[in-house]
Amino acid sequence: MKDVSGAGAIPQTKNRGLGLILTVLFPLLVTGCGGQKLFIYNWSYYTPPAVVEKFEKEFKVKVTYDEFASNEDMYAKLKAGGGGYDIVFPSGDYVSIMIQEKMLEKIDQSKIPNLKNIDPAVLIKASYDYKMDYSVPYYFGAAGITVNTAKVPDYERSWSIFSRTDLKGRMTMLDDMREVMGDALVHLGRSVNSKDPRQVEAARDLINNSWKPNLTKFDADGFGKGYARGDFWVVQGYAEVVFEEIAEDPELMANSVFFIPPEGGPSYIDSMCILKGAKNVETAYNFINFIHRPEIYAEFVDYFGFPATVNIPARELKTGPSWYTPEELTNTELKDDLGDSLELYNDAWFNSIRVD
């Protein structure tokens, strides 16, 4: 969503591309559910069906699970009064906005004993709500770069790969202002949250002059499928999206490398929040606490090939591979709510970079 109204503008945040899988159907009726219900509003393809089923059976609850593809879509629907949800999963900058807008219930931490499992290092990064007054971290991650090493055997683990003219027409970056602008700012040695007009202009110029000419397109939805077809050899995006698409292609799986550039980049913390006026608050607390059981969190991250970035005990219970390590996130930086300075980014992105 583009908002150029200045103060109170809605930031453009990640569109994770997880809408690749348009529908994830969770069982809505469980034998013996009784009268308890829980209404969840979460990113597309972000909680394993088996985890929801286990929660339903154990707590005798009927779960209704609706999906959104971007923070903007989620926020607009809630502000319009839609949904009647109990739990929502915004990213950090939107947690900040929703706290300011008084859209969230304050968390009673005594009802979530498994908060003890959350990594303090993640809470330090969650400066928007590090005391977990209104939000409980769900997952801490970042976009990165996937390379087809059969086509690109020699490459540098850096955002500078998008400057390579020999790969022109074989690369994509996300159609996401804060992600791409953040990558350019970091590559120039700046913060992903810079409010300096000269630094934002320099990032704009780097993208326009060195990166964009080599891209097939900016793409937040189809980059995984395009990579799987062989159309693209280098894509910026989310590892789980790409590897889901190539899972049935052993050769491409073997030749694909995902990395988060050591220079850093934008990262995200998606959190579980209870909406103001939620009707099933106690059940919502049960669900949040359930997610942070080490064995349940391990099942969640194993399902998507994530590292267990948020829940420390779950790291010992993981059984599957991860597409990247928690250490690769060390130099990343969360995207903050930019306030009035968002206009600098809107101008650079919509009036220059995204003008074809």
Image (tube, rainbow, N blue to C red):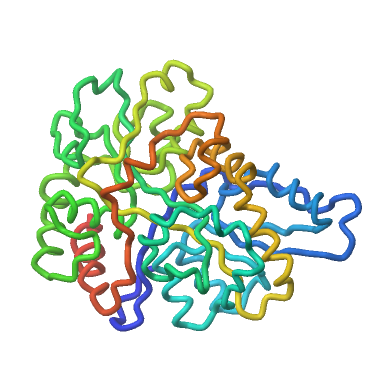
Residue 223 figure quarter: top left
283 versus 30 height, above or below? below
In the image, what residue occupies the spot 61% across and 39% down? 299
Closer-to-camera residue (288/198): 288
Closer-to-camera residue (20/169): 20
Left or right placement of residue 24 versus residue 16 in this view: right
**Residue 308 horizontal/vertical position (percent):** 49, 43
Quarter holding the C terminus is bottom left
In the image, what residue occupies the spot 12% across and 45% down? 210
Residue 345 figure quarter: bottom left
**Residue 153 horizontal/vertical position (percent):** 23, 20
In the image, what residue occupies the spot 12% across and 52% down? 188
219 versus 282 height, above or below? above
Closer-to-camera residue (57/160): 57
**Residue 219 horizontal/vertical position (percent):** 36, 47
Left or right placement of residue 323 versus residue 59 in this view: left
Q: Count the marks.
A: 0
Left or right placement of residue 48 versus residue 345 in this view: right
In the image, what residue occupies the spot 42% across and 67% down? 130
Quarter holding the N terminus is bottom left
**Residue 163 horizontal/vertical position (percent):** 14, 39
171 versus 72 height, above or below? above
